[in-house]
Amino acid sequence: SKQANSSHLPTNKAEFKAAIVRHLHSTLGTDENKANEHAWWKATCAAIQEHVLDGLRKTQKTHYMNDTRAVHYFSAEFLMGRLLSNNMQNFGVFEVARDALKELGVELSDIMEEEPDMALGNGGLGRLAACYIDSLATLNYPAIGYGLHYEHGLFRQEIQNGAQIERPDSWRDYGNPWEICRPESIQDISLYGYVETKYGENGRIQKEWHPGTIVKGVPWDIPVVGYNGSTVNVLRLWQSQASNYFNWDVFNAGGYVDAQSENVQAETISKVLYPNDETEAGKELRLIQQYFFCACSLKDIIRRYKRAHGDDWSRFTQQVVIQLNDTHPAIAIPELMRILVDRAELDWEKAWEICTNTFAYTNHTLLPEALEKWPARMIEKILPRHLEIIYEINHRFMKEVDKKWPGDNEVKAKLSIIEESNEKMVRMGHLSVVGSFAVNGVAELHSKLVKENLFPEFDALYPNKLTNVTNGITPRRWLKVCNPKLSKLVSDKVGADWPLHLSKLAGLEKFAEQKTFQKQFMQIKQANKQALADEIKSLTGIVVDTNAIFDIQIKRLHEYKRQHLNLLHIMALYRRLLENPDYDMHPRVFIFGAKAAPGYKLAKDIILAINKVADRINNDPRVNKKLKVVFMPNYRVSQAEKMIPAADVSEQISTAGKEASGTGNMKLALNGAVTIGTLDGANVEIAEEVGDDNIFIFGLTVDEVNSLKAKGYNPYDIYDNNTEIKAILDWLETDYFTPGEPGGLVSIKQSLLEGGDPYLVLADFEAYSNAQRAVDQAYRDKAKWAKMAILNTAKVGKFTSDRSIQDYVDRIWKLNTCKIS
Ligand code: 26V
């Protein structure tokens, strides 16, 4: 009934059974008796895909016929996770499919586990892109995601003797049933070589780039099904392939031999996702990846534009808006300038006007080590013409700066796209701000810091360019699909359309104190905890008590996210229990999920420490009734979907000012977890929504962090005066947690003392410990806790990605909805 175009969907079990069996036979070449779970999974996907492709064809035809304006979301990462259950839910055929399979003797929940995650992203930024394309399709906006078709996504994490080991991820090894190759849209992409300056007709100087090599870009389309299944947009991911083109002129000209010898193998470009999160590595292959997918995507966009408008560029900015997901695709700015100036032969001014009305840029971090900079020499070697264009952009920009602040060389040096350091560097953030018509941060606090600290003069120079769009999450995947029990209860109370109108969750408020509803809500939480307990047992062997508080911290491992603050507090509880067996606390299970960048030593040491402390505690019968610690290996989207519904407490404890937004915080609150957190990122807005009584806020604020650092923070002052902290840090140095290996965990102590404790772990410890005591007290009052949990679900409707997307549409993209019939 809720289907917008249900006519093409299988409406009954019989039809579905027939489709699945047909695919077993003719797509997979097997039969009902021989098929294993993997084959059943693939046949089920194929049965769904028929309808997905039907919707895709209708959508593309409608968009073409209406010549719609579309947003083009450029992102180096799309962390899609699994697609089967999502696609079934969005088409509204989940139950039918489940029942059809049951009659075939197959359990849907079992075969869903066969699907590998599409882990083509690191963390928050990549998952945000996935939520946004879900919302764009759901809201019927013409949109296309553009990115890289990595052969290997984020590494698979194994834990050996407590340490992280990285293994390759191979999500396509046995074929991916969702993607479609589009050889008809292959693009040729140039790299290396040199620039020739010549005189064109009427004496105009012309630049021609003679590339050293050409690689092919092969597009793979992944359909993106909106909720209700009416709009089906695409995610287009580019795979690199050798082209056999090699420019012998460049080779013979001499002097370019070196550049050629360092030439990359074409196929390596899309081989692997860089596993760094928030650290800039400056690797040549990564710049090539970025250019490769931007150049392919721009050619694709322009081909489509020209099909409708020929060589008339005057309507380009009416049809096309490109959103840059961080600076990773910023090289698209000089690439579009090159196409317009060198190829289309537009005047620079006209080209620049088109360019700066096409791009918008989202900043996702303030951490200095994450702000991308590329050596000018590296750009010159790989993209010689682009470096010239960047210099020209900067030259004209510096003239503008001089008009605003005449003769002020300091402000020029600060704003320049080129950093005049020992080695000249190109600041991709500055290039993005100058080349875009809108720049946004991802939460109110973050956007304020972008304006005031990161780009203050840009805000003065371009009033109203800098703005905020608070992040969001899709409630389809992050409640409806991952938490079916709670979803059903919510639907019973507020109606079934909450996945499209998340503010309707507010209708739960009036039940927050009702005994029967509290009981239902907490029984669901209990069932979800039991399911997670089973998963924990099967993955780690650890047995946990579901009456304990499930306290969950899931996110990439980084010092600023302070998993080690959580760990130090766990050690404090352990110590208190050893000193006083009657130490009064409700049983608690601390659960972690986190991957560390392979080259980030301290992050890996923190994973080791969590595992070593967990081992000791979990095997200490003196404390086992009250304390357990679990590190879940290989945290990823599909695992998040199992953990989030089971959380009582959500750990969001970054140093204030460091976490741009966070999105896990939103997912956990939506599923009825209560946050313990700092006033950072979107926590601030979550606190505003749920109210002070329903969240545990602690720790230094951004202003307090700044003044503490300004007056000179010395972690030894705390170490010397706080006996508990001293005992815990000293404990790390013994062999208590690393039998036979004293000092096995000392690097954490060192970073917090000699290292200066850059993220103020010790400064916030006491406040955190007190907040945890308050959590413990609150949980013991069952009715009080149930009310808090319910109000968290009820009050976080703001954080649907539909609201974020509507914000982008209204204030930046200016799109119209396009209904598909
Ligand atoms: C940085 C880099 C640096 C160069 C190497 C490759 C690479 C890959 C990823 C990143 C991370 C970019 C920043 C990022 O992910 N920020 C996160 O964005 C989330 C969505 O807006 C936000 O919720 C998180 O707070 C923020 O840390």
Image (spheres, grey):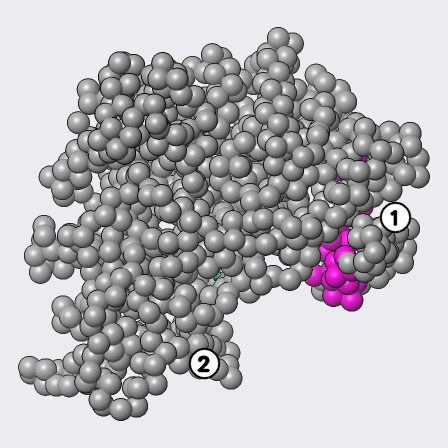
Give the extent of the magenta segment. Answer: 745-774
Q: Indicate the quadrant containing the C terminus: top left, top right, bottom left or bottom right.
A: top left
> Disc 2 marks which amino acid?
Lys
Quarter of the rendering containing residue 523: top right
Magenta stretch encompasses residue 766: yes
Residue 817 image label? none
Magenta stretch encompasses residue 409: no
Image: 686 above or below 170: above
Residue nearest the observer in this picture, 214 or 570: 214
- Measuring from the top left, give residue 750's x and y in whole percent: 77, 63
SS under mark 2:
loop
Q: Indicate the quadrant containing the N terminus: top left, top right, bottom left or bottom right.
A: top left
- Measuring from the top left, give residue 758's x and y in whole percent: 70, 61
> Disc 1 marks which amino acid?
Glu
> Residue at coordinates 88% horizontally, 51% vertically from top-left?
727
Q: Residue furthest top?
A: 516
* Label 2, residues with CA under 10 Å away: few <14, some 14-19, many ≥20: some
Mark 2 residue's CB less than 8 Å from ligand 1: no
On the picture, is 662 further left or further right than 178? right
Instruction: Please name the predominant secondary structure of the magenta segment in the image.
Output: helix
> Residue at coordinates 36% horizontally, 75% vertically from top-left?
379
SS under mark 1:
helix
- Measuring from the top left, give residue 132's x and y in whole percent: 38, 41
Q: Label 1 belongs to which residue?
A: 724
Cα separation, mark 2 vs mark 1, equals 48 Å
Q: Label 2 belongs to which residue?
A: 424
- Is residue 453 among what the camera can see? no
Residue nearest the observer in this picture, 568 or 221: 221
